[in-house]
């Protein structure tokens, strides 16, 4: 049984007096955000609100929080992971245009990724998509503008709607997501909606109470600055370079969606770095409490900027990747925003990406409903031609697991209750 809200252990979690490292991604991200909220306002009223929110989260998702519930409260429930023999699992792979058109015409639901010209030629149907030419296929990492990647959604998930969201409507995404279901979002890179979602999504109501997953669309690296990334609504053929496209699904009571992260990067043993504001562009920072220019710090300490900044969200490591140093303005550009009052460190190097990745995939026969990985991992770890097991999908300009992520693989799993 999950204890009542009056149990002191809830308060200890949101105030970080119990610095527990969660096993479940959504729980760790929520508790981390609640603890920041308490750090800014430690009034009894605010602590009570945070406890209420955490308790409600545990009640709703107790079916996928079995390990954490058992560790925290001494109770347990059986978690059943989907397997390749389970008929609800989808197929996900690259297809040529003719094959992709035939599959879409079967009226099943799909998440689609590919070159803009190919996506424009697909028939109308139950799909959303985004532009990208980089993929992790079953045969290995590849770059192609001749095929599209289809992720077929299992029939047990019932499509509710396909909706687009402008910058002023982004806070509606969690509200439109099913109470028991999941939503996939595709966001065009470096658009207004990308920047806004990255900065603000962590504060949207119920963002961690809903299973929201997705990716940032992009273009071939040779076309950066020439072509804008796009997102597509397959139901009516429309597309945009400045809207979020979302597909919402519901699940039966016997199933629950779980959002997961596979991040090989850990906080290194170096300096503690904090920032004064939420921002994609950084000038100053605090290094072990001392104010310095971040660009100078990286340069003078010979920091490998292929390694991201890493924060510990109560057991889930969250990356912020470094885009580059602007020497003229003495600033550092990032691929995701750093957040105020969050402690970061430069990541430890990853020696063998593929081996370490396969070692931490959940279960030997684990097959997620949807997954994607980061273009930076594809490039920096030289994943072309290499395989990452059952984790196949687009290699993207950013990943979404509730909030925007970098240099991370994310996945959606369906759990039997």
Image: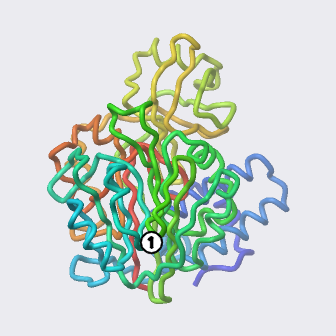
Could you tell whether 217 is left or right of 199 in the image?
left
Q: Residue at x 54, y 10 (%)?
A: 328
Secondary structure under the numbered disc 1 in the rendered image: helix
Could you tell whether 198 is left or right of 382 in the image?
right
Q: Answer yes or no: is residue 16 visible.
A: no
Residue 233 percent across, percent down from the top left: 48, 63
Could you tell whether 361 is left or right of 315 in the image?
left
| Residue topped by disc 1 | 67
Residue 114 percent across, percent down from the top left: 32, 53
Colour convention = rainbow
Could you tell whether 216 is left or right of 281 in the image?
left
- Image label count: 1
Please state which of residues 178 and 104 is positioned toward the viewer in this rendering: 104
Please state which of residues 252 and 153 is positioned toward the viewer in this rendering: 153
Task: Give the quadrant of the C terminus.
Answer: bottom left
Residue 333 percent across, percent down from the top left: 52, 27
Look at the picture and state if 359 lies above or below 103: above
Q: Quadrant of residue 306?
A: top left
Look at the picture and state if 399 lies above or below 191: below
Q: Answer yes or no: is residue 276 visible.
A: yes
Task: Give the quadrant of the N terminus.
Answer: bottom right
Please state which of residues 9 and 132 is positioned toward the viewer in this rendering: 132
Q: Residue at x 37, y 24 (%)?
A: 304
Q: Give neighbour class at mark 1: few <14, some 14-19, many 20+ (Cα, 10 Å).
A: many
Residue 150 percent across, percent down from the top left: 30, 64
């Amino acid at each position: 049984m999950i204890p009542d809200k009056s149990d002191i252990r809830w308060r200890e979690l949101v105030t970080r007096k119990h610095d527990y490292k969660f096993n479940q991604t959504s729980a760790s991200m929520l508790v981390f955000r609640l603890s920041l909220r308490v750090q800014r306002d430690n009034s009894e009223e605010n602590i009570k609100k945070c406890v209420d929110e955490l308790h409600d989260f545990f009640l709703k998702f107790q079916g996928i929080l079995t390990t954490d519930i058992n560790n925290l409260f001494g109770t347990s429930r059986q978690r059943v992971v989907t397997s390749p023999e389970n008929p609800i699992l989808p197929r996900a792979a690259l297809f040529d245009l003719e094959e992709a058109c035939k599959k879409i015409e079967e009226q099943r639901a799909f998440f689609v990724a590919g070159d803009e010209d190919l996506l424009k030629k697909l028939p109308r149907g139950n799909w959303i998509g985004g532009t990208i030419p980089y993929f992790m296929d079953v045969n290995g990492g590849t770059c192609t503008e001749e095929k599209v990647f289809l992720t077929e959604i299992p029939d047990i998930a019932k499509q509710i709607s396909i909706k687009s969201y402008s910058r002023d409507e982004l806070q509606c995404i969690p509200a439109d997501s099913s109470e028991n279901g999941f939503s996939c979002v595709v966001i065009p890179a470096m658009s207004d909606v990308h920047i806004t979602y990255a900065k603000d999504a962590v504060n949207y109501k119920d963002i961690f109470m809903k299973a929201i997953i997705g990716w940032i669309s992009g273009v071939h690296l040779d076309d950066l600055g020439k072509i804008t990334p796009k997102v597509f609504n397959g139901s009516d053929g429309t597309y945009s370079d400045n809207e979020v496209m979302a597909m919402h699904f519901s699940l039966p009571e016997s199933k629950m969606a779980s959002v997961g992260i596979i991040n090989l990067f850990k906080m290194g043993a170096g300096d503690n770095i904090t920032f004064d504001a939420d921002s994609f562009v950084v000038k100053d920072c605090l290094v072990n409490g001392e104010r310095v220019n971040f660009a100078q710090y990286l340069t003078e300490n010979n920091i490998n900027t292929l390694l991201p900044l890493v924060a510990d969200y109560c057991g889930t490591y969250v990356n912020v990747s470094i885009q580059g140093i602007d020497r003229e303005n003495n600033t550092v550009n990032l691929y995701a925003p750093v957040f105020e009052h969050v402690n970061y460190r430069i990541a430890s190097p990853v020696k063998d990406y593929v081996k370490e990745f396969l070692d931490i995939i959940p279960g030997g026969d684990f097959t997620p409903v949807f997954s994607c990985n980061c273009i930076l991992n594809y490039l920096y770890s030289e994943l072309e031609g290499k395989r990452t097991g059952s984790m196949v999908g687009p290699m993207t300009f950013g990943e979404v697991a509730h909030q925007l992520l970098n240099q991370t693989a994310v996945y959606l799993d369906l759990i039997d209750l």
